[in-house]
Each structure stands twice: as structure tokens, then as C-alpha cells.
Image (cartoon, grey):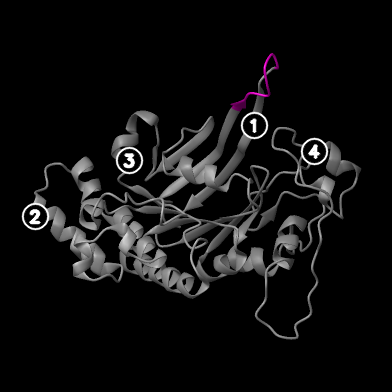
Amino acid sequence: MTQAVMQATNLQRHYTVSTGLLRKSRLLQAVGGVDFELYAGRTLAVVGESGCGKSTLARMVAMIEEPTDGQLVLDGKPVLPTDWASLRKSVQIVFQDPYGSLNPRQRIGAILCEPLVINHSETSRKERESKARQMLEMVGLRPEHFDRYPHMFSGGQRQRIAIARALMLDPKVLVLDEPVSALDLSIQSAILNLLTELQDRLGLSYLFISHDLSVVRHVADDVIVMYLGRAVERGSKQDVLDAPMHPYTKALLSATPRAEPGAAKNRINLKGELPSPLNVPQGCPFAPRCWKAETKCRAERPKLSDASHSAACFFPENTPEGA
């Protein structure tokens, strides 16, 4: 197989959290060790409940936050904080909120040209404006939009502008942090189709952060499921979504709406609350809510194997033959 565009090994991010006056600070493991490989022209989706560490992982990949431990490799070279300024050209991010991610005081043309002003100051104003207009056309907007302000656009149009801005530096990797969750359903499909077209046209790699498995089914090639900062299952989209091995993945899928009238529904209602990331249970962190948990689960943490489809579970649901 070709070399991965990006590779993460045991990527971690910890925070020191104050618990009050005269009390000892505690350690919060937002991301407790994630491995993945991202290939050109493919989409890796990271899914899980709110607070599982998805967005923190996205910020580390986009070089907004420095990992506490682990290593990120881009094009075969380790990503070091001292190289962030030059490497950020290859990794760009599209945020969830198209209303908050654009400067309301700048015209769209200035917003699109700004990355070139910062990173390619040698380019002329005419060259920057020409490329910005090309990007507007590429994302389905009209030339007259160049001189307008963000408040003059709908949410879907603003997200198209945000995507165009991310493409101005010709990146290899786009980090998409819940890029359609703030949009109406009628607009979501248009943005997802745009992202698919751009990927086919430009050979982009996507790290797609989402909690919506129906969206993931539409866009992903590979999937990582996260729970309390750790990956609990990974594999191809077909393997993870059609034959989930981890009970948590199965519970997430059971809660996903299905557009099949009359189809049998087998909703799995998890018992108990999501544990605090400041007080992660010993052993398997999902054990307090899992209907399959046994004594071993509460004493020892299961790990992901190197198999193409694996789950961090001692008693997986659908074990592949030969495993």
C-alpha cells in the first residue's frame, strides 16, 4: 500500500484542571492514546458522544494544540512544534459553526486572500484575488460574492466560503470538525456532496469528526469510534457500521434514525451516566454501562489489536473468523 499522508501513534492530550482553592489539581485525559493512518483520497471518520475527545484530536491534527505525548507524522516526517508554521499549509481545518468562523468585518475576498497574505507574501494582489475567485467558483458560489460580507449569506453558503478558505493553501489534509451539524438537513447533503466532489478532484485526505453515524455512512472510508478519550473500535466503514464488534458502537448504531418504515427497531438503552473524564473507571471505561461486562472488564483495560477491524473489548459482538 502507498505511504500514508498522515500517521498518528499513541497521540495524547492531557490538561491540568483546578478543582478549587487549596485543592490539588487533577489530570484530565482528553485524548488517551489514538493511532491512525490517513491516505490520499480517503476519509477517516472519528465518531463518539460529546466529550469523547473528537474535537481535541482534530485540534492536535490541525496543529492548533500540541500533543502531550505520542507522535504525528506528515508525509513521512515527524510533526514538531518548531515546524508548525510551514506544515500548517498542508493541513487545514473547517470548523463546525459557519457563523462564528468568518470575520464579520471582512469582505469574502479579504477572508479568502488572508491565508495567502500570511503564508505566501511574495504573491501579488492580482494573483491572490484570481485564486480566491477560482475557489469561490469551485465551491459553487458566484463571482459577485467576492465583495460581500458574511452576514449576507446563508449558513450553507458560509460553510462553502469556509471550505474555500481552507483550500486556498492547497492542503493535503482537511480536518472537518462537525462541518454540517449546524446546518439544516436540506443543506447538509449539498455540502457533503461538495466535499466528495472536491476530494475526487483534488485527491484530498479528510479527517471527518462527527457524532452523526448516518452522515459518516455517507462520507467515510474508515471509522474510529472513541469513548472517554480512547479509540474503542476501528475498521472500514462497512465493517464498523454493518458488523460492530464493540457494545458501545452497537449502542450508538441502535440510536441512529433509520429511513425504513416498518423496520424493526432494537434500541439499546445504556444504563448509568457517562463517567467523568476526571475519574475514568479502572479497567474498561465502558464497563459501568455495558450489559456484557464481567469481573475481568472492571479490572483490566482491553486494547485494540493490529487487525484491520478490531475492538477494545474482551467479549466482542461480531468476532471475525480466525480472530
Q: Residues within 10 Å of mark 2 (few under 14, many from 20)?
A: few
Q: Quadrant of the N terminus?
A: bottom left
Q: Amino acid at mark 2?
A: Lys
State the residue position of label 2.
126
State the residue position of label 1.
28
State the residue position of label 3.
87
Residue 255 highlighted magenta (yes or no) = no
Location of residue 306 in the rendering, given as x and y in whole percent from the top left corner:
63, 49
Helix, strand or loop at label 3? It is helix
Q: Amino acid at mark 3?
A: Leu
Q: Amino acid at mark 1?
A: Leu
Location of residue 130 in the rendering, given as x and y in whole percent from the top left corner:
14, 60
Q: Is residue 255 left or right of residue 197?
A: right
Asked whether disc 1 touches disc 3, contact meaning CB atoms under 8 Å apart, the reply is no
Q: CA distance from mark 1 to mark 4?
A: 17 Å
Given this view, does label 2 or label 3 mark the residue nearer the observer? 2
Q: CA distance from mark 2 to mark 4?
A: 60 Å
Lower sequence index among marks 4 and 3: 3
User: Seen from this angle, which residue lies furthest right?
Assistant: 295
Lower sequence index among marks 1 and 3: 1
Q: Which mark is residue 283?
A: 4
Asked whether disc 1 touches disc 2, contact meaning CB atoms under 8 Å apart, the reply is no
Lower sequence index among marks 1 and 4: 1
